Amino acid sequence: MGENAAPGLISELKLAVPWGHIAAKAWGSLQGPPVLCLHGWLNNANSFDRLIPLLPQDFYYVAMDFGGHGLSSHYSPGVPYYHQTFVSEIRRVVAALKWNQFSILGHSFGGIVGGMEVENLLTYKRRAIEHMLQVEASQESSSVLSLKQLLQRLLKSNSHLNEECGELLLQRGTTKVAAGLVLNRDQRLSWPENSVDLVSRELYAHSIRKLQAHVLFIKAVHGYFDVRRENYSDKESLSFMIHTLKSTLKERFQFVEIPGNHYVHMSEPQHVASIISSFLQHKHVLTAL
């Protein structure tokens, strides 16, 4: 598995798709209830390396790299990256793994896309998601650089990341070449000016109305919406998301605020592990399909 393998990691996966492959990594028990882990925008599956070993090991966790991220193939030239295409990727992974029921653990953008996939599975696949978790995610350049240079750029554009967590993301997010390192991610991917660029409010609200899963939303006190930009006008997007979830799902929605920042699941995973573990182990009753 290699000297940098995460604790408890049981395998690296490579799932075939028409444009190449989706890379993923798995922890836990193959016989356990499956949990699909979805990383944030411009991150990769390594963002779960510190959290998953602290969760119940009788579950089967699979953390995938979205297309153009981590070790997954880039989309073909001319094929754009839309949130709908990431939803389609999730569906392909679930089909390849032959899962009928599973939970979703999503960080930032991964949580939003996971919510979109819940609707698609319920509407078109008639499958059941047992429950969804949403834990509260930017990078540069395809030129050849040293690890120190890449790390400096990463930390400069992500004030919430510490050096150790940055190195963890770069382990999976770079490839070694003769002169140094290059980023793996597709350079067509960039951070949008506004999170609404990723998923419209109308589509988000529509998806939540279709949702039959139980949802745990964990927000860090100093999370993305609090300090990402000095004059970040889209804080109201978070309020909209929480209000939509609470008013629509009612008793099926749980909101928890914890100390930490946007990468608290990496830098201080113990702050979220017990909350997520409790939620996973609770026997939620599903609405009949």
Image (cartoon, helix red, strand yellow):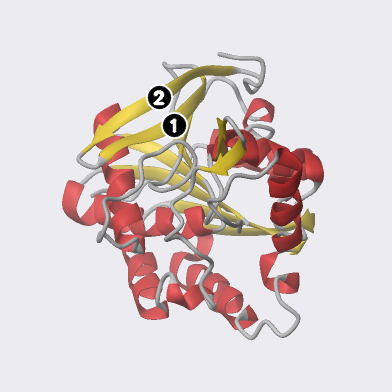
- Residue under the image location 47 percent in, 52 percent down: 214
Give the camera-side residue of 96 and 172.
172
Instruction: Judge left or right: residue 74 versus residue 159.
Output: left
Give the quarter of the figure containing the N terminus. Answer: top right
Residue 60 spot, x, y in % from top left: 47, 25
Residue 151 spot, x, y in % from top left: 73, 47
CB contact under 8 Å: marks 2 and 1: yes
Q: Which residue is mark 1?
A: 24
Three-letter amino acid code of the residue under disc 2: Leu
Give the camera-side residue of 147 and 266.
147
Residue 53 spot, x, y in % from top left: 66, 26
Q: Secondary structure at mark 1?
A: strand
Residue 170, located in which quarter of the rendered image? top right
- Residue under the image location 49 percent in, 37 percent down: 283
Which numbered marker is on residue 117? none
Which numbered marker is on residue 13? 2
Q: Secondary structure at mark 2?
A: strand
Q: CA distance from mark 2 to mark 1?
A: 5 Å
Instruction: Judge left or right: residue 1 versus residue 18.
Output: right
